[in-house]
Image (cartoon, rainbow, N blue to C red):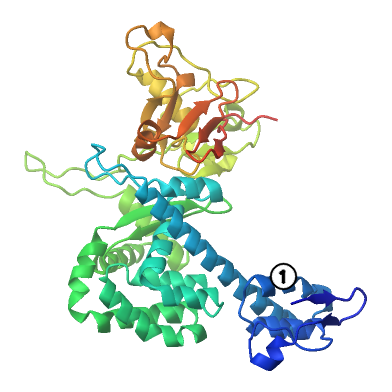
């Protein structure tokens, strides 16, 4: 099959006519065709290596408005085809990791599958996102080959295929197969939202008596998470049972209704009410002597790192809000000068912005050393992990020499790094290797496959 795009007009010639005679939708149209005609053909063709090579014929400058829509559809079909190939690879990687898991490790019930570390580092994803993609790929490959086939043909999107795996996650294989059979015929004509609604209805039909059992399983997944967004804002999310969500809504609405009519919108009042209920909550609990404990701010610790010049208003360099990232100088000063704030001085290197080290020689780090490392690294030092450092173990990069502490492996910041429990175990129980450059603060991890991944330092001072 050959295709040639002419240089100076809107036509292309081809030497293949199989599509016209056999009905194969991957065939190329006969005779010279315009860029728009190529777009219309590829928008309905079954994607694959041959049609992917033809995407170069979709010259944006030669497409009409109609042709651009067809070209967009053609690209989307090929994106689905590519994602189907990734699903297979991810499932293979997960299977390889499970096959390599030792049988007797003495870790109790701990999950030994570290495939997500390889995937997270290779694709620059968070550990949770990598684990999610692996789980979806494994479910699709093992339980829903027909869905994967539709994805590979470009008839559905990856988000639709992902919905099939997620919505049926608590079903047994037989019930999941019944759900797939019910929804699959209509999926190519549906949006992602329509597919999810159809899946939820099909789940109730396929396993009407299992709703409570599934609910109990999902309750175990309840959690809270957040992510920083633009312009000093953040999204704060809770995954919780529906009755609790309804009670929270009612409590927030009731509290927001007590606010004065001061120009705030209803949504603004609801956010302020949620904050007020959590942070400035009244306790109202009986004390041992029969009284009531006073309300007040919750015992929450918010850490912001800011330079002295910014603190006094001499410059406007951003600060660093622990767990969220950079914040404006104004926001940093608001936290720094809030009632009850405690200031701690951190001395940084004038060139690198890294904290100046201390030098104890005992195995357990001193409180000062611990504060130092936590403040310096802020999170687990595995490249894809964002676990806050204060929740991590402090690990010796070079093992501590209990016989002769002066000989190496000293308990000092240059030889310590925070690792969450999962990545602490990864370092000590697998073939992953790690080293830290004491001059730059750069941490380099080497996977068992030989691939290396670098986690850069987070300077606390602004370096120009």
- Can I make out residue 263 in this image? no
> In this view of the protein, which residue sits in the foreground, 206 or 213?
206
Q: Quadrant of residue 100?
A: top left
In the image, residue 435 above or below residue 173: above
Residue for point 40% across, 33% down: 427
Left or right of residue 217, residue 290 in this image: left
Q: Position of residue 62 (x, y in %)?
A: 83, 78
Q: Position of residue 168 (x, y in %)?
A: 32, 72
- Can I make out residue 123 in this image? yes
> In this view of the protein, which residue sits in the foreground, 155 or 260?
155
Residue for point 37% across, 67% down: 142
> Residue most toward the right?
8
> In this view of the protein, which residue sits in the foreground, 163 or 280?
163
* Quarter of the picture holding the N terminus: bottom right
In the image, residue 454 above or below residue 412: below
> Residue most toward the left?
289
The tally of labels here is: 1
Q: Which residue is mark 1?
A: 53
**Label 1 crowd bin: few (<14), some (14–19), many (20+), radius 10 Å:** few
Q: Position of residue 385 (x, y in %)?
A: 45, 43
* Quarter of the picture holding the C terminus: top right
Q: Position of residue 452 (x, y in %)?
A: 56, 37
Left or right of residue 405, residue 60 in this image: right
> In this view of the protein, which residue sits in the foreground, 133 or 139?
139
Residue for point 26% across, 76% down: 174
Secondary structure of residue under mark 1: helix
In the image, residue 9 above or below residue 231: below
Left or right of residue 211, residue 278 in this image: right
């Amino acid at each position: 099959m050959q295709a040639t795009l002419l240089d100076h007009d809107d036509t292309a010639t081809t030497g293949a006519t199989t599509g016209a005679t056999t009905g194969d939708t991957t065939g190329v149209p006969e005779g010279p065709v315009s860029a728009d005609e190529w777009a219309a053909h590829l928008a309905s063709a079954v994607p694959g290596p041959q049609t992917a090579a033809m995407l170069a014929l979709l010259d944006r400058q030669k497409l009409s408005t109609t042709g651009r829509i067809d070209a967009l559809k053609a690209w989307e079909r090929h994106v689905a085809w590519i994602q189907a190939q990734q699903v297979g690879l991810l499932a293979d990687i997960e299977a390889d990791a499970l096959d390599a898991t030792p049988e007797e490790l003495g870790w109790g019930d701990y999950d030994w599958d570290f495939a997500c570390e390889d995937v997270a580092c290779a694709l620059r994803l968070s550990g949770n996102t990598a684990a999610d993609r692996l789980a979806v790929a494994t479910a699709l490959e093992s339980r829903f080959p027909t869905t994967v086939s539709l994805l590979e043909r470009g008839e559905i999107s990856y988000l639709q295929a992902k919905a099939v795996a997620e919505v049926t996650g608590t079903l047994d294989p037989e019930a999941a197969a019944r759900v797939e059979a019910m929804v699959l015929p209509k999926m190519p004509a549906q949006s992602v939202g329509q597919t999810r609604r159809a899946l939820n209805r099909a789940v109730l039909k396929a396993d009407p008596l299992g709703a409570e059992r599934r609910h109990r399983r999902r309750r175990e997944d309840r959690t809270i998470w957040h992510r920083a967004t633009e312009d000093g804002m953040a999204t704060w999310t809770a995954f919780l049972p529906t009755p609790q969500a309804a009670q929270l809504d009612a409590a927030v609405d009731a509290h927001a209704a007590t606010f004065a009519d001061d120009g705030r919108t209803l949504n603004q009042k609801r956010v302020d009410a949620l904050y007020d209920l959590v942070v400035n909550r009244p306790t109202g609990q009986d004390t041992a002597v029969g009284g009531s404990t006073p309300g007040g701010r919750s015992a929450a610790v918010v850490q912001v790192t800011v330079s002295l010049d910014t603190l006094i208003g001499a410059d406007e360099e951003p600060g660093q809000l622990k767990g969220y990232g950079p914040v404006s100088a104004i926001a940093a000063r608001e936290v720094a000068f809030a009632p009850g704030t405690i200031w701690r001085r951190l001395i940084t290197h004038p060139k690198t912005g890294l904290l100046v080290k201390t030098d104890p020689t005992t195995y357990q780090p001193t409180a000062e050393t611990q504060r130092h490392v936590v403040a310096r690294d802020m999170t687990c030092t595995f490249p894809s992990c964002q676990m806050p450092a204060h929740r991590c173990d402090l690990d010796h990069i070079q093992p501590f020499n209990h016989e002769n502490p002066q000989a190496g492996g000293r308990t000092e910041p240059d030889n310590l790094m925070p690792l969450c429990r999962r990545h602490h175990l990864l370092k000590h129980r697998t073939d992953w290797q790690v080293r830290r450059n004491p001059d730059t603060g750069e941490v380099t991890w080497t996977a068992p496959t030989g691939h290396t991944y670098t986690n850069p330092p987070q300077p606390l001072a602004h370096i120009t």
